[in-house]
Amino acid sequence: MEAWRTLCALFWNEKFWLPEGFTWKHLENTDNGIYHPQVQDLIWYSIPIAAVLLVLRPLFERYIASPIAVHLGVKGKVIVQVPKNPILESEFKRNKNPSDKQLQAIVKQTDWTRRRAIVKQTDWTRRRVHRWFRLRRNLGRPSDIVKFSENSWRFCFYLSAFVYGITILWDKPWFWEIRNCWIGYPDQHVSDDVFWYYMLELAFYWSLSASHFVDIKRKDFWETFLHHIVTIFLISMSWSGNYVRIGTLMLAVHNAADVWLDAAKMAKYAGRQKLCDFLFVGFALVWLITRLIIFPTRIIHTFLFESTVIMGWYPSMQVFIAAVVVLQLLHFYWSYLISRVIYNSLALGKVEKDERSESEEQSSEEPDVLGGAGDVIDDHINHNMNEKK
């Protein structure tokens, strides 16, 4: 017990967490009408809310989003029979997506006994073996209805959170003058609307992190997971040190683009290509404004040049700034992927695929030209090559 107290004392060291001249007593709640955020709020409120969201999500997807998807004509999963082939199945377990060179090696084995087995069993050319691998991979891929439902859940949350956030922040002084995020620290009152805004956002990212390993897996699986962890860290750390004002601005900035993102994907899965392209353009513009202009020039700038002048330079602020920079690096990474989508759309005349995510492959022998808007955070959205021809 004594060791635990020592560990807690080291972790919550005031010299690390707070500006010079402040102690944790400055953040204790009294009867002066100012509510300071408490660390225990992160446990007693966000975790239970996250559990509720994890329960509500499958119910929402099954009983609300899926029926809407069916009504809109979103395609379900097409079951394709894959010819049984023990040898190819064995190769598939080692490498689910072999290159052309590897496919050639599978067909033309140096082990002639094994090669005769393949020829005897299938008598397939390299092209047919390539098609078998593609069909085999598709067996484990989710349907468009599943993708539509997952995006619907995120869209509803991001839209609600963005509207609620802008509504409660509209009359807050730091919304219009960002220096007010630091002025008056630590006696900065956390009102009830801001309290629940924070708890709901934190709970949502907890739920996303918990479901991340069972959701649709995408190419940026670990980048997205890192994004969730960094976001949880920033929300929790800002709450613990009462940097809630700047935290609310960061949440609002991030929610703005996510709304357009999931809406574009939903439109694509529903077969509304023109609406999808329109929403993707909106997403790209909002992303550019919020993630590449406002976030670095306002959020990061106030951390580096205003907070340090008003509050000083201390360890937790340095850690906070480092985490914000990591978040911005992820923004640059995803911006690069978005730029590829835009470049390909100019070349092909339609919005290309989301470069971040794993595509569901077509049963056609032709390679895919992927259409519609892609979530820089989520799945590929496919468009058949025949539309190009």
Image (cartoon, rainbow, N blue to C red):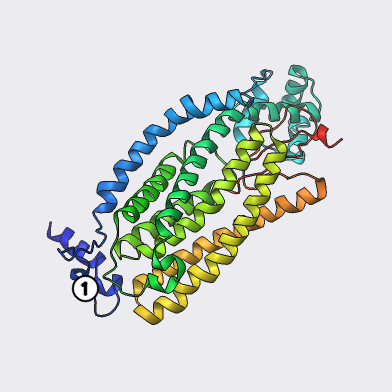
Q: Is residue 248 left or right of residue 33?
A: right
Residue ID at (43%, 50%):
164
Residue ID at (26%, 65%):
11
Q: Amino acid at mark 1?
A: Thr
Q: Nearer the viewer, residue 228 or 349?
A: 349
Q: Residue 252's spot in the image, x, y percent?
A: 47, 56
Residue ID at (32%, 60%):
239
Q: Nearer the viewer, residue 345 or 283?
A: 283
Q: Is residue 267 above or below residue 40?
A: above
Q: Nearer the viewer, residue 265 or 339?
A: 265
Is any atom of residue 171 visible in this view? yes
Q: For the C terminus, which image quadrant?
A: top right
Q: Is residue 285 above or below residue 203?
A: below
Helix, strand or loop at label 1? It is loop
Q: Is residue 313 left or right of residue 134?
A: left
Residue ID at (64%, 44%):
374
Q: Which residue is mark 1?
A: 23
Q: Residue 91's spot in the image, x, y percent?
A: 65, 31
Q: Is residue 257 above or below residue 105?
A: below
Q: Residue furthest front?
A: 171
